[in-house]
Image (tube, grey):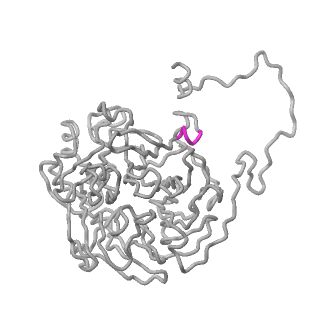
Amino acid sequence: MGFPTVYPTGATVYNPSKAWSGYTVYQAGDEGVVLIDMNGREVHLWKGLIGFPAKALPGGYVLGSTGRRDPKFGIQDNVDLVQVDWDGKIVWRYNGYEHIEDPGYEPTWYARQHHDYQREGNPVGYYAPGLEPEVSRGTTLILAHKNVNNPAISDKQLLDDVIIEVDWEGNVTWEWKASDHFDELGFDESARNVLFRDPNTRSFGHLGGGVGDWLHVNSASYVGPNRFYDEGDERFHPDNVIWDAREANIIAITDRRTGRIVWRLGPDYSLPEVKHIGWIIGQHHAHIIPKGLPGEGNLLVFDNGGWGGYGLPNPASPFGQKNAIRDHSRVLEINPVTLEIEWQYTGAEAGFSVPTDSYKFYSPYISSAQRLPNGNTLITEGSNGRLFEVTRDHEIVWEYVSPYIDRRNTNMVYRSYRLPYEWVPQLAKPEEIAIEPIDAAQFRVPGAAPKGSDSVVSVAAALPFVEGAACVATSDEARRRA
């Protein structure tokens, strides 16, 4: 995948008449959590706050973390989850899940939070009419880690994913541990064999001896009010929890009352009932679109592609680990009952030749998608720090590229969220100035020559040049055969 050395950052496209305008919050490299307006102006920075992810609350509050565990001892373990006001004051903190004594560090209570959380009042952590998150009370759903040993899965130590709910005082009121439900995850014999031998062992964690990040759950949210439950389908009870595991290519719903998995997509996408969807690989931010938004009740997910899953070996996966591979991404909106794709954004909808140029929409890790009140979708193409808003007809009406380079020399953005102006009463509504798309063919940096030749001669042609077959068959070619 090619990557330019010179490219614009900040806001690059903005159509105020078609975008759902507001502020956008995201983690700005190593700087902290930043709030930008539609023109990319940085209107506020919570310096030093870790957004994994950063989520805004009404009143100018933001949620994030104040520190992360040394990777010699743990993988992506945040020390706490905090709510911070506009002035940077911590007004709520949870750090009471596990008391840890890492060599060289003071014994500390950790939340071990990673990847996601939700505050009571809103099931998914982004704006939906009538579903405002609490700011001074209520429970918080937190995705966390726990180190476990489970010989039914592997003889190696596992980094397990747990989902807990805590009240305002920090008491754990509900807990669910993924490893307790191994038999409900749908792994076939070949996948179980691969997992047993090597449960995605990471060299980080536990004094460098490694730990098996076997599922790597990266999202957890409430199902929330929805039409399917209203019609009597108990699997979609609003209090149930939907989560997804990038290493296993699984999206699932856990029943809050029984703890059992009552709905699942993956890990095997060759089955007849899901074959039409294609393989969902390494996905992020799977959630049910909240009530009050277009597409409410449907599953929305950033299907990364990249690599994920366990199973039979193949040329790209000689040991059967990460055995599903694809070099482009998709955003999918799926009816969770019929399993039909109701909307999507892929390289084809982006206007690229498929599959030869599908990689031009591609983030093999992180990333997210948010449904907006006007039916648009805010997409975080995270690995290259690109945030953009598309209409139902796939028109890009806002685009922004993060200028913040982190210590790994990337401008990655884990997630971004759009919020209404009124959630930030500290600021006056900003002026909205349209940004017309640049003609990239004419754009030049200072000192570069413009397009066009100084001297032109014509060469006689035996036949006219006609754009035709590429080296690889494209989807257009397949349609012509049909």
Percent from the top left, x then y, of residue 402?
56, 61
The residue lying toward the viewer, choosing from 182 and 228, is 228
Q: How many numbered circles are shown?
A: 0
Q: Is residue 46 visible?
A: yes
Q: Image point 23% across, 48% down: which residue? A: 199
Percent from the top left, x then y, of residue 191?
23, 39
Q: Is residue 61 left or right of residue 177?
A: right
Q: Is residue 337 left or right of residue 156?
A: right
Q: Is residue 442 left or right of residue 241?
A: right
Write down the quadrant of residue 64 in the picture.
Answer: bottom left
Q: Which residues are magenta?
A: 347-351
Q: Image point 54% across, 47% down: which residue? A: 392
Q: Is residue 104 visible?
A: no
Percent from the top left, x then y, of residue 441?
72, 45
Q: Image point 32% across, 36% down: which residue? A: 269
Q: Image point 24% across, 66% down: which residue? A: 164
Based on the picture, tell me whether residue 164 belongs to the magenta stretch.
Answer: no
- The prevailing secondary structure element of the residues shown in magenta is loop
